[in-house]
Image (spheres, grey):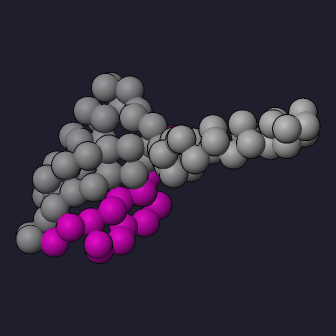
Amino acid sequence: MSPTRLTLAAALAAMLALPANAETEAAPSAEVQAQITTLLTAQGYDVRRVALKDGLYEAYAVKEGHVYEIYLNESLEILRTNEG
């Protein structure tokens, strides 16, 4: 196999081995998670999970039997809420 094909094959194998969201989702610090949980709990949400995705904090929460995705910026301001 030529060096170019070997490099291409190795790159493709590495890409396939990674989870699809490996680059875009991470866990924020415990302090930020606590701040978001406190903020949303005060608004009546039951926070289930907080992630950092594409530069925004994304909280998954339940309120009155409905599931929500809540997006916050780095200042912890709510940008949008999607019912999911």
Q: Residue at x 39, y 35 (%)?
A: 27
Q: Is residue 21 positioned above or below 80 on the image? A: above
**Which is more toward the observer, 32 or 28?**
28
Q: Position of residue 57 (x, y in %)?
A: 43, 47
User: Taken as a whole, is the magenta stretch helix, strand or loop?
Assistant: strand
Q: Residue at x 29, y 72 (%)?
A: 84
Q: Is residue 18 positioned above or below 83 on the image? A: above
Q: Residue furthest front?
A: 1
Residues rendered magenta in the picture: 66-84
**Which is more toward the observer, 6 or 25?**
6
Q: Would residue 35 appear left or right of 14 to someone viewing this image? A: left
Q: Position of residue 22 (x, y in %)?
A: 51, 42
Q: Is residue 56 visible?
A: no
Q: Is residue 54 visible?
A: yes
Residue 64, quarter of picture:
bottom left
Q: Position of residue 12 (x, y in %)?
A: 69, 46
Q: Residue furthest left?
A: 65
Q: Is residue 78 magenta?
A: yes
Q: Would residue 15 appear left or right of 64 to someone viewing this image? A: right
Q: Residue at x 85, y 42 (%)?
A: 5
